[in-house]
């Protein structure tokens, strides 16, 4: 399990609805009971999918060159180049280096990748055991 860059199934498992939050509403005139996320987040139940989506995006956001450099070969990212971004894959160059590749060209200088970048694929996600739906 990759805790720095969890898979979607790990994020979903960490953000299941569990229990309820009760709080006073309208200056104590009534009580409201809303579902609570396993992480402690609580809001209107219709907003929970947005919360999970935000957590998934945050888990996949790369903001520093140190984070970028620490990613293993086989990682795929989309940088913040434009509206659509550029896709890079980290892969060996055959000469002992592991640069980021874009359009068949190696990029050894990490400043060529515009951060923040979005992690599209992490090699650990391939080895994560899949669970069946209940």
Image (tube, rainbow, N blue to C red):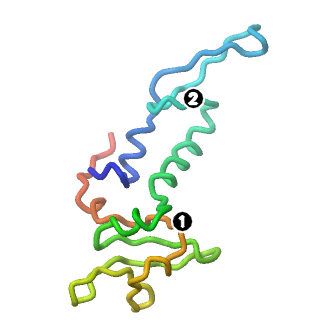
Q: Residue at x 50, y 81 (%)?
A: 112
Image depth: mark 1 or mark 2 in front: 1
Residue sitting nearer the eye, 94 or 44: 94
> On the rendered structure, is 117 left or right of 106?
right
Q: Which mark is residue 125?
A: none
Query: Quadrant location of the C terminus?
Result: top left
Q: Which mark is residue 42?
A: 2
Q: Quadrant of residue 65?
A: bottom left
Counting from the top left corner in percent of width and height, residue 51 is at 56, 42
Q: Is residue 15 above or below residue 73?
A: above
Q: Residue at x 27, y 87 (%)?
A: 93
Mark linked to residue 116? 1
Q: Residue 104 falls in which quadrant of the image?
A: bottom left
- Give the mark nearer the N terminus: 1 vs 2: 2
Residue 11, placed above or below residue 103: above
Residue at image position (40%, 62%) is 67
Mark 1 surroundings: few (<14), some (14-19) or many (≥20) residues within 10 A: some
Horizontal arrangement in the rendering, residue 68 relative to residue 63 (left or right): left
Query: Height in image: 92 above or below 42?
Result: below
Label 2 residue SS: loop
Disc 1 versus disc 2: distance between alpha carbons?
A: 28 Å
Residue 55: percent from left, percent from top: 50, 47
Residue 31 against residue 57 in the figure, above or below: above
Q: Residues within 10 Å of mark 2 (few under 14, many from 20)?
A: many
**In the image, what residue occupies the spot 41% across and 85% down?**
107
The residue lying toward the viewer, choosing from 116 and 74, is 116
Element class at badge 1? loop
Marks 1 & 2, CB-CB < 8 Å contact: no
- In the rendered view, does 76 fall on the left or right side of 124? right
Looking at the rendered structure, the number of numbered marks drawn on it comes to 2
Give the image location of residue 33, x and y in percent. 61, 18
The percent coordinates of residue 115 (x first, y second) are 53, 69
């Amino acid at each position: 399990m990759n805790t720095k860059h969890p898979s979607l199934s790990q994020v979903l498992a960490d953000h299941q609805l569990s229990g309820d939050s009760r709080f006073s509403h309208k200056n104590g005139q009534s009580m409201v009971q809303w579902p609570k996320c396993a992480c402690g987040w609580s809001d209107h139940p219709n907003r929970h999918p947005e919360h999970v989506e935000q957590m998934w995006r945050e888990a996949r956001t790369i903001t520093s060159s140190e984070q970028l450099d620490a990613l293993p070969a086989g990682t795929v990212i989309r940088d913040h180049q434009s509206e659509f971004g550029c896709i890079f894959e980290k892969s060996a160059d055959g000469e002992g280096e592991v640069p980021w590749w874009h359009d068949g060209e190696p990029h050894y200088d990490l400043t060529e990748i515009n951060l923040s970048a979005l992690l599209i694929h992490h090699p650990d996600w391939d080895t994560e055991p899949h669970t069946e739906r209940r």
